[in-house]
Amino acid sequence: MKKFPAVFLDRDGVIIRQVDLPQKESDLKILPGAAEGIALINKLGYFVVIVSNQPVVARGLITLREAHRLNKVLATRLAKRGARIDAEYLCPHHPQADMKKYRISCTCRKPAPGMILQAAREHGLDLKSSFMIGDSTQDVQMGNRAKVKMILVKTGHAGKDPWQHKGVPDFVAKDLQAAAKVIARIKKRDLR
């Protein structure tokens, strides 16, 4: 079976403006250049996957269903701007969650690579030729652990998040659109 390359995207601070605990549609403000960056990634033939920790679910501020609905709303808004999201994965867990059913240490919460690995299994993705784009050190460590090429963007937390996990990005870009151009250059180079 042929495997496909993917680009895994953090949501908050990469696709949309960084908001503490986004809970409603009005919190989904698409960053400048984000839709254009995703559209370029689509044009390059990558499978596009959102991977996002959702502590709002662990805290009981919204339900898991509502969190998925917000991602669908975002995907619809992006589609209207020519950008396609192929899949979305979120982690509702937290070791100190207010909601008992989500109070676990899991393999999907960043910086663990579980969401990437699950997407790869379910969609036949080739991680060796894939990328992760994120704005935090937990995104960087997730990408490193999944063994995908990691691009840190200077939007959102810009790598200055309070968690400060160990990890090293392969590339640093101004924003999602600039990160997509990095991927385009690498793909062009690899086709030579």
Image: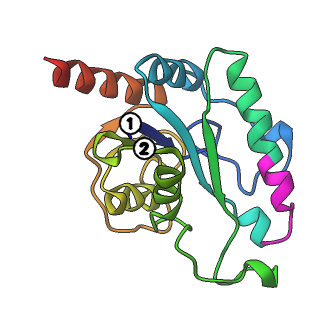
Q: Position of residue 66 (x, y in %)?
A: 86, 52
Find disc 1 in the rendering and name its residue: 5
Residue extending farthest front: 1
Of the 4 image quadrants, the one containing the C terminus is: top left
Nearer-the-camera pick, 115 or 123: 123
Q: Position of residue 55 (x, y in %)?
A: 70, 66
- 102 in magenta: no
Judged left or right of residue 165, residue 108 is: right
Front in this rendered view, residue 178 or 160: 178
Residue type, numbered disc 2: Leu
Vertical relation: 124 (above or below) 190: below
Q: Nearer the viewer, residue 27 or 188?
A: 188
Q: Which mark is residue 125?
A: 2
Instruction: For mark 2, give the secondary structure.
Output: loop
- Judged from the image, the secondary structure of the residue bearing numbered disc 1 is loop
The residue lying at 35 percent from left, 21 percent from top is: 181
Position of the N terminus, as image quadrant, is top left
Image: magenta residue range: 59-68
